[in-house]
Image (cartoon, rainbow, N blue to C red):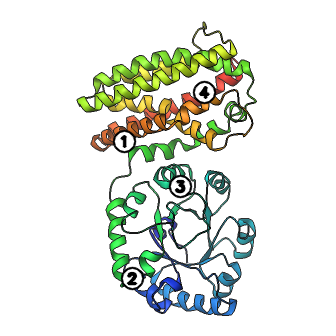
Amino acid sequence: MKYDIKSALRLYLVTDRPLSLGRPLEEVVSEAVAGGVTMVQLREKECPTGEFIALARRLKALLAPLGVPLIINDRVDVALAADADGVHIGQSDMHYEDARRLLGRDKIIGLSVENFSDLERANSLDVDYVGISPVYGTPTKSDTAEPFGLEGLRRAVALSTHPTVAIGGMNAQTIGAVMATGTDGVAVVSAICSAPSPRKAAEELNAIINQQTDKIMSWTKEVWQKSLPIYERIIRHPFITELADGTLATERFARYLAQDEIYIKNYGEEMFLLADMLPDEAMRKMFRAYAEEGMAAEAAMHQMLIDNFGIDTAVEPSEVTAGYMAHTRKYINTGNPALALAAMLPCMWIYNEVGLYIYNHRNPNPNPYSEWVATYASEDFTEGTRQILEMCDRYAEEATPEMREEMTRAYLVAAEYEWAFWNWGYHGEN
């Protein structure tokens, strides 16, 4: 049977017999599915193989008529013997390629990712979903990696090319905020297995999930997904990869920074013009503070690098710089803050994401461009960007479909200019 993976991931039960209060596992699973569980993973770490297979076959017979997929944790042999719907493997389990070769194309394979490097590798694999693990610390697993947290989960969801399920610390108190990140579902253990009534627990969790997913997808998540191919081209561009490991030629960085000096001065002026468009005084105050602090930090970083490398900034705007400034100015001139924000957002958001990406993958050796990375990966820059993203989503929620579409167009063109800006820095007129 073929399944809609995103729908199946919504409320994903991972079994744990020691946490099931002495009840037969079939009873717990049956109640949980009646309450809205959409996928079941059978996890048995100490079970003899024969008993594991028998248990998997009983659950398969229970779940198949209900259209609920059964996934086996780790054990491809058990999945094959029980004709389960798939397996979930971790980073230290059987390699994906081997699991796929043994199971075939029709079975589901899920893969746990414990950091952004794992996620990057997973993006190049044809897995059916990724489990982002752990989001929070959890007592059910003591050998987990550093938790992603909500911000890490939000970035991981945006960067993943596969459907995602959040794992670790999922319960009625956490899943509302977790689902708001845009993940396709949550994987739950004790919140259902240890509940007095697994059915009622599943119903409560399902209601929270429905409440979140009934809301319109946030504009920022939607536009990030649309711009992800651009972002991936950016982080794979030699300008960024060489800047990240400190090998970028000085003349290339100098060419980029001289143009950025021109662009940033224009951008600062436009930020204050945009602030004056905002209808709410509190919003204007927040935006001006972000603009002042951000521009001051960038200016200080620029001056340090200009002095360190002896960069001549007395240059004419390149075709790319001029085009990018014309693009943002066009939307500033509309007098519409939603459109102006959308056009100017990539210069904040993409820089922040690139800074965080380099920081999380940084070379341990000294890097002459470390100040550049530190500025855009800083907590202040990240928090300011988050506030601007929330502002964009508020505008998008009130926008007409046509206005929302124009916001997206303004953002995507600006994102392409971000790529072109670094590309011109690397190659120049060539």
Q: Position of residue 262 (x, y in %)?
A: 53, 14
User: First in sequence: mark 3 or mark 1?
Assistant: 3
Inspect the image, locate mark 3, and give the three-letter code of the amino acid beneath it. Answer: Phe
For label 2, the residue is: 198
User: First in sequence: mark 3 or mark 4?
Assistant: 3
Give the camera-side residue of 50 and 61: 50
Q: Position of residue 108 (x, y in %)?
A: 60, 71
User: First in sequence: mark 4 or mark 1?
Assistant: 1
Q: Quadrant of residue 208?
A: bottom left
- Structural distance between the alpha carbons of marks 3 and 4: 31 Å
User: First in sequence: mark 1 or mark 2?
Assistant: 2
Q: Residue furthest left?
A: 280
User: First in sequence: mark 2 or mark 3?
Assistant: 3
Numbered tag placed on residue 390 in the rendering: 1
Residue pictured at 53% horizontal, 73% vertical: 140
- Structural distance between the alpha carbons of marks 1 and 2: 36 Å
For label 4, the residue is: 420
For label 3, the residue is: 148
**Mark 1 residue crowding within 10 angstroms, few (<14) / some (14–19) / many (20+):** some
Asked whether, in this view, residue 145 is left or right of residue 3, the answer is: right
Q: Secondary structure at mark 4?
A: helix
State if disc 4 and disc 3 touch (CB < 8 Å). no
Inspect the image, locate mark 4, and give the three-letter code of the amino acid beneath it. Answer: Ala
Q: Secondary structure at mark 3?
A: loop
- Structural distance between the alpha carbons of marks 4 and 1: 27 Å
